[in-house]
């Protein structure tokens, strides 16, 4: 089943409340996904030359400060790290590729959950309220975020199989539904250089959109290409550096609700996750149409069939 949520704040005065509202929305989807949960939060943009990576240690044995010091010495870069439960956020004045290559040698067990200059991704097994509290979601600040509660159907229940899945710098995806052609599509993408971390069908969708974006397509065109190449049932929410986008398949059997007022835009699998948002009584509420891309970026909204 699974539940997905997204919240984009138009009013900067609400940025301090992003985590609080996103947690309420996420917990509201508990019945649709009690196996695991995860979320992406977009905070302040880093200064030029800096990169931010969210890291995950499955063994929870890493000395994060020690890792940052070793990275500084080996890459001749400055690095600072902030631990949150099993995850840590590393900010360094080098590139994502340099850090990722260094990790493969020095700390190959560590997984990169996200990279970019705004995004942080946290995900884990357990009830959504426990996962949110584990990482301190309610206190997080930012302009927008997306989240997912998982009822596993296609692959194992692990932290790695939880959503969101990264799809590129400051780009991630959450998915409600299932894909029927993901094994064939994974092989097709693998032959074109895409590397997978799990056997999850949703990761295939994330990698597919990353591939299309790498071909130079804008996000809306990459999503529309998915309507042709992704078989199955889906509602996707895709987080970007400046907002988020929503896409349902051509039948749209997976539920989704959108709401918008002067202060925010929000989406969820069911209205109950939107019901506690401030000003919901002033919001326009509607069901997104099948096979239509909805996107909000920097207060610009596009809809295109």
Image (cartoon, rainbow, N blue to C red):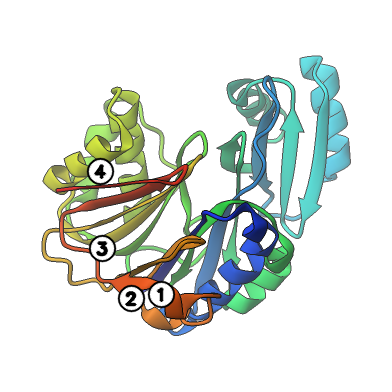
Q: Going by the image, does 114 lie left or right of 55?
A: left
Q: Is residue 61 at least partly visible in the picture?
A: no
Q: Residue furthest top?
A: 76
Label 4 or label 2, whichever comes before in sequence order: 2
- Residue tagged by mark 3? 178
Q: Nearer the viewer, mark 4 or mark 3?
A: 4
| Numbered mark located on residue 1 in the image | 2
- Residue tagged by mark 4? 223
- Residue tagged by mark 1? 151
Question: Would you call the spot at circle 3 few (<14 residues within 10 Å), some (14-19), or many (20 or more)?
Answer: many
- The residue positioned 11% from the left and 65% from the top of the image is 251
The residue tagged with tag 2: helix, strand or loop?
loop
Q: Is residue 149 at least partly visible in the picture?
A: yes
Q: Are marks 1 and 4 in contact (CB under 8 Å)?
A: no
Between the C-alphas of marks 1 and 4, the distance is 24 Å
Q: Are marks 2 and 1 in contact (CB under 8 Å)?
A: yes
Viewer-proximal residue, 86 or 19? 19
Q: Nearer the viewer, mark 1 or mark 4?
A: 4
- The residue positioned 57% from the left and 67% from the top of the image is 22
Q: Going by the image, does 78 lie left or right of 200?
A: right
Q: Going by the image, does 243 lie left or right of 21?
A: left
Label 1 or label 4, whichever comes before in sequence order: 1
Q: Quadrant of the N terminus?
A: bottom left
The residue tagged with tag 3: helix, strand or loop?
strand
Q: Quadrant of residue 284?
A: bottom left
Image coordinates of residue 113 in percent, x first then y, are 57, 46
Between the C-alphas of marks 4 and 3, the distance is 16 Å
Label 1 or label 3, whichever comes before in sequence order: 1
Between the C-alphas of marks 4 and 2, the distance is 22 Å
| Numbered mark located on residue 45 in the image | none
């Amino acid at each position: 089943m699974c539940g997905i949520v997204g919240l984009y704040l138009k009013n900067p005065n609400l940025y301090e409340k992003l985590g609080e509202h996103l947690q309420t929305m996420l917990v509201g989807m508990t019945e649709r996904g009690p196996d695991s949960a995860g979320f992406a939060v977009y905070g302040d943009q880093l200064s030029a030359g800096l990169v931010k990576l969210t890291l995950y240690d499955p063994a929870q044995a890493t000395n994060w400060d020690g890792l940052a010091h070793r990275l500084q010495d080996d890459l001749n870069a400055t690095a600072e790290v902030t631990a949150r439960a099993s995850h840590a956020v590393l900010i360094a004045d080098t590139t994502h590729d340099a850090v990722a290559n260094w990790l493969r040698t020095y700390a190959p067990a560590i997984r990169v959950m996200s990279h970019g200059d705004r995004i942080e991704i946290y995900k884990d097994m357990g009830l959504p309220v426990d996962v949110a509290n584990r990482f301190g979601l309610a206190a997080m600040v930012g302009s927008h975020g997306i989240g997912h509660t998982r009822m596993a159907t296609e692959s194992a229940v692990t932290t790695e199989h939880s959503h969101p899945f990264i799809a590129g710098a400051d780009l991630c995806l959450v998915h409600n539904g299932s894909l029927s052609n993901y094994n064939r599509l994974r092989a097709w993408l693998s032959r074109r250089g895409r590397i997978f971390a799990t056997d999850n069908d949703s990761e295939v969708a994330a990698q597919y959109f990353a591939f299309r974006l790498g071909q130079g397509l804008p996000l809306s065109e990459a999503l529309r290409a998915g309507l042709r190449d992704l078989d199955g049932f889906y509602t996707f929410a895709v987080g970007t550096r400046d907002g988020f986008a929503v896409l349902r398949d051509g039948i749209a059997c997976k539920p989704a609700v959108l709401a918008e007022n002067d202060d925010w835009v929000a989406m969820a699998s069911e209205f109950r996750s939107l019901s506690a948002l401030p000003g919901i009584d002033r919001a326009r509420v509607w069901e997104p149409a099948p096979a239509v891309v909805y996107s909000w970026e920097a207060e610009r909204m596009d809809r295109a069939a």
